[in-house]
Image: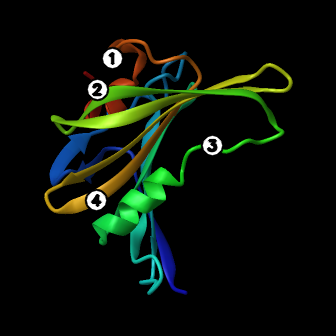
């Protein structure tokens, strides 16, 4: 398998649009310190992944997505991405929400997991087809996302609560 990694601290493409990364890694809080990364793999006959892409920002904001050529396979992967019963979690709560991805409304799921040592993980999972391209997305945050202001500004350029 041939693979390579691209990294950018100033911009990235999503939904055929170029998005800016407001990047201030020198601030005292470091909240605006983000980078884009794309891991590209040679074509797999089984999954046909284009590669995983991600935005990492300080303070626990992480957004990653996969583009998949086959829409049926993307939908199947999305449906199988939900947490199953797992002994490392004391509880897993899932609720359906509406999300805007590049301005297109899509169904998404908000997942809150509580570990056995009472740590809480917050995630939003979605699947969407935009410009004939299927995308499975995953947002992970330290805090519960109740409003759009709870989503990091760099990531909020792509996804917003409806």
Q: Earlier in the sequence, mark 3 or mark 4?
A: 3
Q: Quadrant of the N terminus?
A: bottom right
- Would you say residue 95 is visible in this rendering? yes
Q: Earlier in the sequence, mark 2 or mark 3?
A: 3
How far apart marks 4 and 2 lie (CA) works out to: 18 Å
Q: Earlier in the sequence, mark 2 or mark 1?
A: 1
Callout 3 crowding tier (Cα within 10 Å): few <14, some 14–19, many ≥20:
few
**Tag 3 residue:** 83
How far apart marks 3 and 4 lie (CA) works out to: 21 Å
**Tag 4 residue:** 134
Is residue 67 positioned above or below 83 on the image? below
Q: Is residue 86 left or right of residue 26?
A: right
Q: Quadrant of residue 16?
A: bottom left
How far apart marks 3 and 1 lie (CA) works out to: 24 Å
Q: Is residue 127 left or right of residue 59?
A: left
Q: Secondary structure at mark 2?
A: strand
Residue found at x 32% / y 55%: 135
Q: Earlier in the sequence, mark 3 or mark 1?
A: 3
């Amino acid at each position: 398998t041939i693979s390579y990694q691209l990294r950018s601290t100033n911009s990235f493409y999503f939904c055929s649009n170029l998005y800016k990364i407001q990047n201030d890694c020198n601030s005292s809080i470091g909240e605006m310190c983000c980078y884009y990364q794309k891991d590209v793999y040679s074509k797999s006959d089984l999954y046909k992944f284009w590669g995983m892409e991600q935005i990492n920002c300080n303070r626990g904001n992480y957004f990653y997505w996969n583009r998949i050529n086959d829409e049926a396979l993307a939908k199947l992967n999305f449906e199988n991405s939900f947490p199953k019963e797992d002994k490392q979690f004391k509880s897993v709560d899932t609720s359906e929400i509406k999300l805007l991805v590049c301005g297109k409304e899509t169904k998404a799921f908000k997942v809150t997991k509580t570990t056995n040592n009472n740590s809480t993980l917050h995630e939003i999972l979605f699947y969407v087809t935009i410009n004939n391209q299927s995308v499975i997305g995953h947002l992970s945050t330290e805090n519960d996302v109740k409003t759009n202001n709870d989503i990091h500004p760099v990531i909020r350029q792509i996804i917003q609560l409806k």
